Amino acid sequence: MRWTLVGLLLATLAAGVPAATRLASVITSGPDGCREVALTFDLCPVREGSGWDRALVTLLEQRHVPATFFASGRWIERHDEEVRELLRNPLFELGTHGMLHRHLPKLDKAAQRAEIVGPVQLLESEFDYTPTLVRAPYGEFNERTLEVVADLGLRLVQWSVVSGDPDPHLGTDDILRTMRAGVRDGSIVIFHANGKGAHTRQVVETLVADLLPARGLRPLTVSQLLRGCRHDGGG
């Protein structure tokens, strides 16, 4: 029998084994000195538009840029083919971003568990994929969140550099100033790939074509970044 993450958790609870009381660590960056960064893209649900930045994803594919996407359950339910496209591409990895993109600290522990485990279970059942990374909606979490994440064996990934790309008042130059001021080795940068960032593609193109090479930095997925340094020419 193939045990999934959710299946193992439910079996443990059914057997009466107490859930872990440890708290998950909050990951905001990779190790220093590795000359590598992680570009991450949230896929939050949207009320208008396609919810999918095709031009951005095509740019990442054409330039062979590794990236990590964090998808909400509601977004996954409405973007079957896009999920499969991300999972097929070895450049990309997929994490989760809450089921309904709710404010976690406003929820009790049971409701937080449902919000966090929902998209995990959805990816396992519909796509035969078990995610290991989770990002809190709105970047909000509390001790209950850390308990649930630890119980589920997930890793909570936040960020160290905020692009602000969904803000309609920020132009390309504004976001690039933030990138130049904040991006350094080990950075985890947050963008959006749900179409809410009017300038995301232009910023990412400048980042991967100019800013990162000029600083001797290369992009990796979050999981690759957390595994540590890759020396010149090594993998």
Image (cartoon, grey):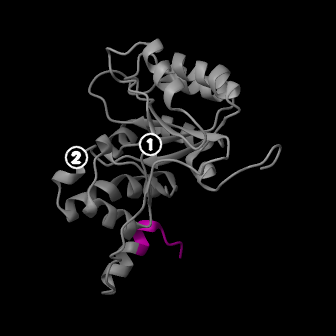
Q: Which percent across, then down, holds residue 136?
A: 34, 48
Q: CA distance from mark 2 to mark 1?
A: 17 Å
Q: Which percent across, then down, holds residue 162?
A: 42, 33
Can residue 225 be seen? Answer: yes
The stretch of residues the image draws in magenta is: 1-8
Residue at point 33%, 21% (across, down): 167
Mark 1 crowd level (few <14, some 14–19, many ≥20, 10 Å Cα): some
Looking at the rendered structure, the secondary structure element under dot 2 is: loop
- Three-letter code for the amino acid on which mark 1 is drawn: Trp
Mark 2 crowd level (few <14, some 14–19, many ≥20, 10 Å Cα): some
Q: Which percent across, then down, holds residue 106?
A: 16, 52
Q: Nearer the viewer, residue 193 or 180?
A: 180
> Is residue 2 shown above or below 103?
below
Which picture quadrant has residue 92? top right
Q: Is residue 229 magenta?
A: no
Looking at the rendered structure, the secondary structure element under dot 1 is: loop
- Three-letter code for the amino acid on which mark 2 is drawn: His
Residue at the far bottom: name it.
Answer: 16
Residue at point 69%, 31% (across, down): 64
What number of labels is visible? 2
> Is residue 81 shown above or below 179?
below
- Left-right relation of 22 to 200: left
Q: Nearer the viewer, residue 128 or 146?
A: 146
Label 2 sits on residue: 103
User: Which of the marked residues, 2 or 1, is nearer the chain's N terminus?
Assistant: 2
Which picture quadrant has residue 71? top left
User: Mark 2 and 1 residues: CB-CB less than 8 Å, in contact?
Assistant: no
Q: Nearer the viewer, residue 145 or 18?
A: 145
Can residue 113 be seen? Answer: no
* Circle on res. 159: 1
Q: Which of the two discs, 2 and 1, sits closer to the camera?
A: 1
